[in-house]
Each structure stands twice: as C-alpha cells, then as structure tokens.
Image (tube, rainbow, N blue to C red):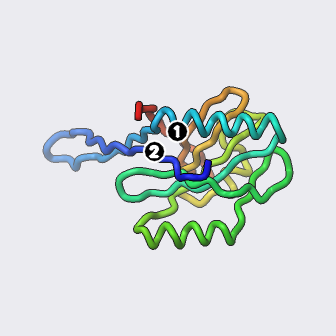
Amino acid sequence: MDAAESIVIFETRTKTMSHKKKKSERVYAFPRKQLRRLVKRAVKKSELSGREICGLILDNGSLLELLALKNKSQAPGSFELSWKDFKRAEQAARCLGHQVVGTFHSHPVSSAVPGPSDIQSATTGELMLIIGCWEKEAMLWRIRKGKAKKLPFREING
C-alpha cells in the first residue's frame, strides 16, 4: 500500500428537544475496495512472516486517510513506527492542513481488539484501526483514558 487509503466520514446530527443542545455524532465509512485491499495485505504479510502492517490515520478535514509506514519491529506480532518516519509524515500532513488522529495495525494471531500494550501505547482520544488476520476483519476503536471503545463504521462502494 504505497498510496494513502481513504475513509469517508459522514457527519450525522441527532435531534433533541428544542431546549437541549444538539448532539453531533461522527459515523465513519470505509471505501469497501480499499478496506478489503488493506485486509488482504495484512493477511498476506501475516502468512509470509507473522509480522504486522502499520501506519497512521490522517484527518484532512472532510475524510480520513490511511498512510502506510514501515514497521520498524522485526518481531512477529508487534509493530513499531519509526519516530523519524512519524515526524516526517506528521510534518507533511500539517503542511497539507491535515492532522494525525491515530494509527492502524494488524494482529496476525489475535482478533481485531486492542490488547493491553495497544491501549497503553496509544495517545488519549486517538483512533485505532486494527485488522484481525484470522477473522479477516477490521475494527475501529477510540482509545481514551486507558480504555478502548469500539466505533461503528460502514463499508461503502467506491
């Protein structure tokens, strides 16, 4: 995955009584082809070497993009982003008016649920997309105050 993958964000508003504030809730949607391609890449990497794929989630103001980065870890079942690669990607994103809002990685031998080390290494409020290679599925999470909350998302054609 050389090019950034895109995730469309749809803004939905839930109506409440007129004397209460309106609550805004984000619903995330992934282009089906791009998400399936990412899952296939993670599964293939897992089968060949037991290694994880990884990268950053960028918000450009209207949609999210996945930017693949090299997994610095040589150990099977782990990932580590290079600080140098991270800072370069963050700087390039800022120059384009984008913001790093999270990470993605695969789990070669476990489900797409954040483990204790995933949660511990995450920044509060960040998004985390995890691909479970055995189940061939992806799950989106928000990590906040040492806890992971599963976020719903849609796959759309396009």
In the displayed structure, would residue 43 be above or below residue 26?
Answer: above
Alpha carbons under labels 1 and 2: distance apart: 9 Å
Amino acid of disc 2 = Ile
The residue that label 2 is drawn on is: 7
- Badge 1: how crowded within 10 Å, few (<14), some, or many (20+)? many
Name the quadrant containing residue 123.
Answer: bottom right
Q: Residue at x 44, y 33 (%)?
A: 154
Circles 1, 2 touching at the beta carbon (< 8 Å): yes
Q: Position of residue 132 (x, y in %)?
A: 68, 34
The amino acid type, in three-letter code, at marker 1 is: Gln
Q: What secondary structure is marked by label 1?
A: helix
Which residue is at a point 58% across and 56% down the rendered structure image? Answer: 56
Q: Please tell me which residue lies in front, 114 or 84.
A: 84
Q: Quadrant of the C terminus?
A: top left
User: In which image quadrant can residue 25 be found?
Assistant: top left
Percent position of residue 156, x then y: 41, 32
Q: Is residue 144 visible?
A: no
Q: Which residue is mark 1?
A: 34
Between 127 and 125, the residue placed more toward the observer is 127
Q: Residue lying furthest front in this view?
A: 2
Nearer the viewer's eye, disc 1 or disc 2? 1
